[in-house]
Amino acid sequence: MRELDIALFEFDQRRRGILIVTALLVATVGLTIAVFPSFGEADVDFNELLESYPEEFRTAFVGSVTDISSLEGYLVIELYQLVWLLIVGSYFAYAAGSLIAGEVDRKSIEFVLVRPISRTRFVIGKFLAMLPAIALVNIVVFASVILGAGLIDEEIRVSRLVLVHAVGALYLVDCVAVGLLASAFFQRVRRAQGAAIGVIFGTFLLDSLTTDTDYEFLGSLSLTRYIDPGELLVAGDVDWGGVAVLFVTACVLVVLAAEVFERRDLS
């Protein structure tokens, strides 16, 4: 059994859940875009309304967007800033929390490790199992946004949408790595999943609440500090330094997960 065999088997076990989540995201995209025309016709200055919100609220749920009259700005607020970064990110961290802890919890880990494969390769195989799920979610949501924009006769710049989904996919990979590390550390699935969600949600709030304060440096611990959907989709700007941090973080977390699992006593 190799890493790829483990990945394919694990993905097949999770296929139904991934399809359900993907369908829910498609429905969310459809509903969000369907509301946009009436949103634009409302007799309310939403940009002025946004300015009246507290800075912490705008950082968490609006990001860098200052104009929501365009479809891109609207999608950042209604879809990418909250749903993608917090909800979808938490889901992948939660799902990854059972990758290793699930085997230990079910006491099936011994039957897996008696095969000629090291613990490190086992961890890598489990991690790889989540990558097709991330790709599927990204492709389907991307296509849904393009289709939805066409149905309401709105233009959206495809190149910028590619950017937000490319960096967004890397962000989800990091969320999986967070869950993988928690899964390698805890023996119980619930503890691993709870810890994974706690890290994603807690650091999301940490990034928002410390912006423009003396403790802003603490926000560097949050993955959301290194991805800005508004800059990507509205301005078309890529923070390559942030991309590098996300990539290195994912690699470090996977290595740590493998090291933790190598040292665990499963007796």
Image (cartoon, rainbow, N blue to C red):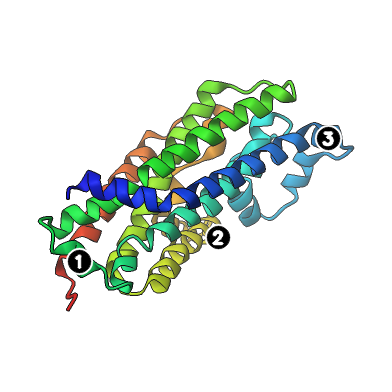
Across and down, in percent, residue 112 comes to 20, 62
Residue at (33% x, 60% y) in the render: 99
Q: Amino acid at mark 2?
A: Leu
Other-residue count near label 1 (Cα within 10 Å), few / some / many at <14 / 14–19 / ≥20 = few
Camera sees residue 240: yes
* Residue at x 46% of width, y 42% of height: 227
Q: Are marks 3 and 1 in contact (CB under 8 Å)?
A: no
Q: Secondary structure at mark 1?
A: helix
Q: Which residue is mark 2?
A: 209
Name the residue beneath numbered marker 3.
Answer: 38
Mark 3: which secondary structure? helix
* Residue at x 17%, y 56% (from the top left corner): 120
Q: Residue furthest bottom?
A: 267
Horizontal and vertical percent for residue 230?
57, 37
The residue to which callout 1 is attached is 111
Q: Quadrant of residue 259?
A: bottom left
Of badges 2 and 3, the one in the foreground is 3
**Which is more N-terminal, label 1 or label 3?**
3
Of 250 and 24, the residue lying toward us: 24
On the picture, is 262 further left or further right than 235? Answer: left
